[in-house]
Amino acid sequence: MPYGSWAELRIDCVILSCAISAGIHGALVRDHFEEGTGAGLGFVVATVLLAVLAVVLTRKPRQLALLGTTAVFAGLIASYLLAITTGLPVLHPDVEAVDGLALFTKAVEAAGLVLAASLMRRPSVAITLNQPKGTLT
């Protein structure tokens, strides 16, 4: 498989990770608003950020978008770790129980984090990724 194809596959997996996580966070917005406004707004913000990153990475997968994706995934994973251990002040002060959907979501985000970070380490990837998806090479 040529290098460009491998980089494109990794970008596609990062986009898929963003989309899956956005969908799950979006589906849980109502439930989290019932727990409190802070938790609900946190899930709205996560949904919007992930959806925007999925679109940006689809249109123009630049290093800045990969950096943003890495930061968002890291933030979501860290937030969940706090939510299940100590709670999040203001947003979700009560300790949350661990559940299967949350663990699945964090696994998807961790995979997206690793892939996005791996694409940032290679300067040559920036050249490969400058062409919008769906255009001829």
Image: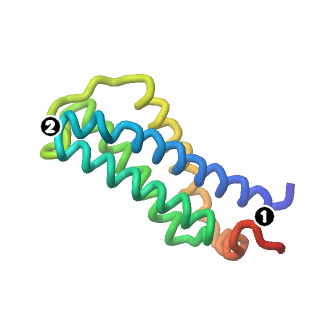
Judged left or right of residue 130, residue 81 is: left
Q: Quadrant of the C terminus?
A: bottom right
Seen from the viewer's position, the closer of residues 100 and 28 is 28
Residue at 27% across, 30% down = 84
Q: Which image quarter: residue 31?
A: top left
Q: How is the image coloured?
A: rainbow
The answer to the question of whether label 1 and label 2 lie on touching residues, with beta carbons closer than 8 A, is no
| Relative vertical location of residue 23 with respect to residue 98 in this rendering, above or below | below
Seen from the viewer's position, the closer of residues 77 and 60 is 60
Q: Which image quarter: residue 32?
A: top left
Seen from the viewer's position, the closer of residues 20 and 71 is 20
Across and down, in percent, residue 112 comes to: 54, 48
Give the Cα separation between the discs numbered 1 and 2.
45 Å
Check disc 1 and give the amino acid type.
Answer: Gly
| Relative vertical location of residue 30 with respect to residue 54 in this rendering, above or below | above
Judged left or right of residue 52, residue 1 is: right
Which residue is the site of mark 1?
4
| Relative vertical location of residue 88 with respect to residue 49 in this rendering, above or below | above
- Sequence-wise, the earlier of marks 1 and 2 is 1
Check disc 2 and give the amino acid type.
Answer: Pro
Residue at 41% across, 31% down = 102
Which residue is the site of mark 2?
93
Residue at 58% across, 64% down = 57
The kind of secondary structure element at disc 1 is: helix
The kind of secondary structure element at disc 2 is: loop
Judged left or right of residue 116, residue 9 is: right
